[in-house]
Image (tube, rainbow, N blue to C red):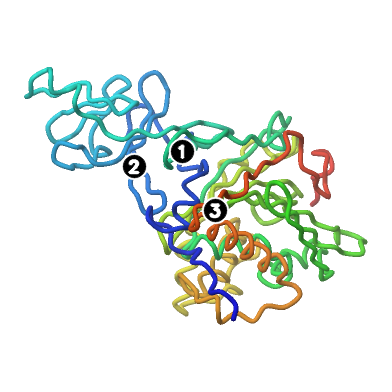
Amino acid sequence: MAAKQMDFAHIGPETLAGRYLRRFWHPIHRSADLQIGRPVRAKLMGEFFTLWRGESGEAHMVEDACPHRQTALSLGWVAGDNIRCFYHGWEFSGSGQCMAMPAEKKSFEAKVQVRAYAVREYLGLIFAYIGEGDPPAFVRYPELENSSGGVTVHQHPVPCNYFQRIENDLDELHIHFVHAVTADRIGLHEMPEIKVSETPYGIRREGHRSGGGRNVTRIGHFIMPNISMVDLPPSPAHNYWTITASWRVPIDDETMMTFAIRLRPGEAPAHESHRVASPDPMQLTEDILAGRMRVQDIDPKYPGLFNVQDNVAMAGQGRIVDRSKDRLGQSDVGVILIRKLYDRELRALAQGKPTKKWKRPDTKLDFAISEVSAYVDV
């Protein structure tokens, strides 16, 4: 009798998946959205944190509860490079050390700390490490660096468990159905033969097509534990083929946030990064799931169309799904492989055995479209 599959969905600090994910860096906020002197409350894997940018411009992150009376530190204010509690003015540095207690003896300050977390800014995102011990080496993405056109950085919520979003990244076939309006418009109509393989960094996915027009063999790289890098076809949000890296970050068990960096060719309009979808894609998603409208009712030129389409396909399964009921076929080889890898890694963690040391190459990963000048499409 086959062993029961491990629980990938629940990501609290005491769960196996939560412990595993906490071994990696994760984006937690857009750099441009963290203003000097304006602390924010950030949520990652069911935990709350206080994130702020001090007067020096450096970002810091600590646990959200002041150790005095548990008031959220994110409600306080920034004093220099420190965060000061709104309730009684206790002040903490970016390292978590208490620096001031206005109504207490000076000797008490040295005895009080809050937990601080390593943060790093990269390509317009703020990454954090919330696991135990020293953080692992920070992974860079040379595919997105030093582009003449720069990159666009965005984030959007997804109303379902993070693992459903990960599985969607390994599913090449859904483009021809979920995104059929766009795929048909650009001439990407040939069904792919999907091949996947485990790599030193995760999974390499190929969607083989015979060619002709825009029916290219798309290549995707899934970097463990939750990063997708793909050749992204044109959509209402951008009118060119490009490369995008997307982090599928759990907010809690039933919601997640996508943080994405998209390579922008030099020919892309300079104002592109300011394009905001209106109405809110999440509102359209909820309206569709509630039966108040259909996906087909959305204007094909709506810039948030891809997000809504994916959200509906994934959240339409339920917030968390009993995967034992799935009937997988030959087109699901990517889904089968990612479940196998997660199952293997979580079992090793449960048994106190070493997990795989994932490592991507320092050089650029290969894609079907390798030159920025070739990205412009329509």
**Mark nearer the N terminus (2 vs 3):** 2
Q: At which x and y percent is residue 234? A: 73, 54
- 77 to 72, vertically: above or below: above
Q: Which mark is first along the chain, 2 or 1?
A: 2
Crowding at mark 3 (Cα within 10 Å: few <14, some 14-19, many 20+): many
**Rendered view: 228 above or below 343:** above
- Could you say which quadrant of the image residue 86 lies in? top left
Say left or right for 8 vs 193. left
Q: Identify the residue position indicated by label 3 in the image.
A: 248
Which element carries disc 2, helix, strand or loop? strand
Is 254 on the left-hand or right-hand side of 238?
A: left
234 to the left or right of 156: right
Residue 285 location in percent, x, y?
A: 49, 67
The percent position of residue 296, horizontal first and vertical second, equals 61, 74
Q: Is residue 92 above or below residue 115?
A: above
Q: Is residue 93 above or below residue 232?
A: above
Crowd class of label 2 (few under 14; some 14 to 19; many from 20; radius 10 Å) = many
Which residue is under mark 1?
Answer: 128
Residue at image position (59%, 67%) is 309
Q: CA distance from mark 2 to mark 3?
A: 19 Å
- The N terminus sits in image quarter: bottom right
Question: Label 3 vs label 1: CA separation?
Answer: 14 Å
Q: Nearer the viewer, residue 55 or 363?
A: 363
The disc labelled 3 sits on which kind of residue? Arg
What amino acid is at disc 2?
Phe
For marks 3 and 1, the one nearer the N-term is: 1
Q: Amino acid at mark 1?
A: Ala
- What number is the disc on residue 49? 2
Which label sits on residue 371? Answer: none
Determine the secondary structure under disc 3.
Answer: strand
Residue positioned 38% across, 30% down in the render: 60
> Going 26% across and 22% down the picture, which residue do you hit?
79
